[in-house]
Amino acid sequence: MSSPNLSISHIASNQTQKEITANTAFDELDGAIAGLLIKSISGDYTLTTTEGGEALAHIAFQFTGSLSGDANITVPTNKKLYLVNNSTSRGHTITVKTASGTGIVVASSSAYTVLYCDGTNVVEASTSGASALSGLSDVSLTSPANGDVLTFDSGSSEWKNQPSGGGGGGGGSIGSLVGYRRTGTFYCKPSTGGSILATGEVINILGNEVTPRESPDANQGEATSYDNSGSADTATGWQGSTLLNWYLGSNLHFFAELYMGSVTDMLLIAGLLGASNLGGSTIPANKDASYFRFDKTASDATIKCITSLVSGTRTITDSGITPVGGHSYRFLIITDDAAPSVKFYIDDTLVATNTTNIPTGTRCIPQASAAWHSGSTSPLIGLSQMVVQSDR
């Protein structure tokens, strides 16, 4: 009697010197789980199948020698693992198979391939990992260049490469807004009865100013806050003062850090709009624009990422982000007019990439504002900073 797979002899009940059989079995089992057979071949080869032989008393097999063509390695039908390395010269493959079953091709390589004989055929127990990023199923690389970073696109569930934007924070953060480009920065002045300071452009205030204070969100620093004093559909927040200073079609970048005291019955707009004096209940229509929107009257359950044209056509992409009252959010828009595409980031994470209805060549204004349709409360909206960049 012997074991069913490795053919190791059993100890007979009435035999003498049982230790001899036991020690032999231990040695054969040791080889079957750890032994290495190095075999030089010149063509097809059949591993010996006897107890303690080549096939059954080893787990790892390294085949060497010079082949003039591809070769077959025949193994017994015993159920067993095989770790196979093809170290033959001249680049030919070997196929590990049973006499009448199918097998697996092993290319010339320094690595070992894990195979298993299931009693009929030889199958692959594991597949080799990707040797490069481009070999991963969830990575999509387009003309990679020095300094590119990987960011996650939730729309396609893929990691994609893009320029780092100058370093110091990666592709999806305020660190993207650096370099020798025209820049307007709007930020808070932390003083009683404070005001918004602007570099490069005057900024208009929408709504009623509240004394600057620390943001209720510990993750956000100083914030100048405004409320709508219970007025329904009255815009509250900040808006560029003129359409003359910023151009869609000049690789515009937009960043704003906003605190929202409440998201109930509200309209939020943050981005670049080809229109001025937008009322609180007005969603940009028939305007060139790239912006974030959260509008309860439009039944938005999550923040939307929108590109639109003056013709009235829009691309609306779901960010998958449900805003929560009493929190601050970092909104970033990066326009690549050559692609063309507009990438939308929330809290440094790429949430959408729009490639249709990309506005170009139109004057626009930056805006970060909110309105509450019911007007029954006076919720706060706070701004830490707003940054805009363009090539002209």
Image (cartoon, rainbow, N blue to C red):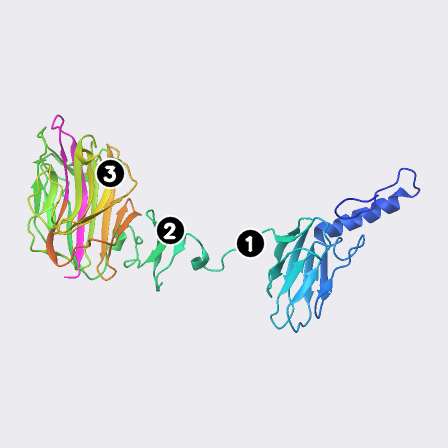
Kindly report the distance in space between the C-alpha atoms of the residues bearing marks 1 and 2: 22 Å
- In magenta segment, residue 296: no
Pick whichever, 364 or 8, lies toward us.
Answer: 8
The answer to whether 66 is drawn above or below residue 331 in the figure is below
Q: Identify the residue position indicated by label 2 in the image.
A: 158
* Labels 1 and 3: the sequence-earlier one: 1
What's the residue type where badge 2 is placed?
Glu
Q: Is residue 234 left or right of residue 334?
A: left
**Quadrant in which residue 320 is drawn:** top left
Magenta segment's dominant SS is strand
Kindly report the distance in space between the C-alpha atoms of the residues bearing marks 1 and 3: 45 Å
Residue 104, position in %: x, y?
A: 62, 58
Q: Identify the residue position indicated by label 1 in the image.
A: 127
Q: Is residue 277 left or right of residue 62?
A: left
What's the residue type where badge 1 is placed?
Thr
In this view, the mark in front (3 or 2): 2
